[in-house]
Amino acid sequence: MAGVYISNMENEMKLVVKWSGKEYEICNLSESDSVATLKNAIHKETGVRPERQKLLNLKLKGKTPEDECQLSALKLKQGFKVMMMGSLEEDIADASAPPEDIPDVVNDLDIEDEEVAIESREVYLAKIERRVREYKINMLNELRPGKKLLVLDIDYTLFDHRSTAETGYELMRPYLHEFLTSAYQDYDIVIWSATSMKWIEEKMKLLGVSTHSSYKVAFYLDSLAMISIFTPKYGVVQVKPLGVIWGKFDQYSSRNTIMFDDIRRNFLMNPGNGLKIRPFKQAHLNRDKDRELLRLAKYLKDIVHEEDFNSLDHKHWEKYRPRKRDKIAPKKEETHEENSSAS
């Protein structure tokens, strides 16, 4: 994804394209130029071809403007940010090749031996307490009494944010809405992404999550709710401490909270509550065969009656079998003959 910052200097329009971790300054545009001219300028600086560019929130009367639309018609204010998705041709070619089954060392940190020590270090607990005090949560929907809590990542968990596509639907993980509808019956849902709140809001709109009628998201958390911790093997890493949520809402705790994330280190502070989901990548190749969310919807149903999620081994969630719950035999009703004999 990329951000485009536009500013006006007399008749000249200057913009900065933020893409792939770098910034590119584009000059010599005017309000009389078209959207096509803008895309060509972006192509010249970034290498992303115009047909690959998706300017997500560049709108004209609520719709995506045509290429021939003049920039003046969009009434862009100084500092306006356009969110862009796009891939280089060589990246698309690489993504089309058969994926190599190589472990992701960075995302799949082998740090189980460090977890207990990290979880109990006072310096990190102090950081969590500071987040509880200072981080402001914008409630989107009310929490429901008696529900457990499901915390979800976005990138590679619900959405392939790297692949190219014509629509957000093509990048959405299969069965996303079915999964959230099922989970919402038993869990309050929170979205926590290691990005800015603006990006989270735009992605949820793009995927149709924020406006869906069959489920509701309680609130979003962004990168500002995360904390940094030090591990001897990997140095400083950013993590998502669930204690931030538990400190703000006492109805939730380690006993009734589960987090799905494609990066294990994100739940390093709460290893007993994290489930590492298989990352959803190369959407154009995997859309028709990815069933991860269907299986996880069943897992959430199976464990909902567990009294303590810490007692579960989420690493082996696919092997979980729900325990048989004791059934109370119904009372035997007295028959007419029994009543007669008793009298």
Image (cartoon, helix red, strand yellow):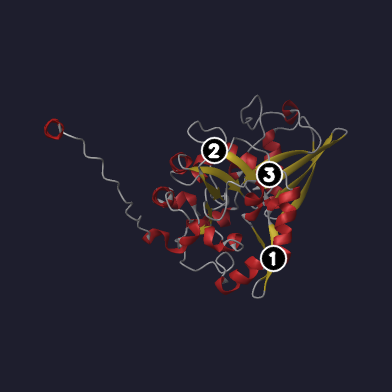
**On screen, residue 42 above or below 260:** above
In the figure, is residue 290 to the left or right of 267? Answer: left
- Which mark is in front, 3 or 1? 1
Q: CA distance from mark 3 to mark 1?
A: 22 Å
- The residue under label 3 is 197
Q: Disc 2 marks which amino acid?
A: Arg
Q: CA distance from mark 3 to mark 2?
A: 24 Å
- The residue under label 2 is 144
Lower position in the chain sequence, tag 2 or tag 1: 2
Lower position in the chain sequence, tag 3 or tag 2: 2
Q: Disc 3 marks which amino acid?
A: Met
* Pick the front one: 11 or 317: 317
Secondary structure at badge 3 equals helix
* Pick the front one: 215 or 209: 215
Secondary structure at badge 1 equals strand
Q: Residue furthest front?
A: 343
Lower position in the chain sequence, tag 3 or tag 1: 3
- The residue under label 1 is 229
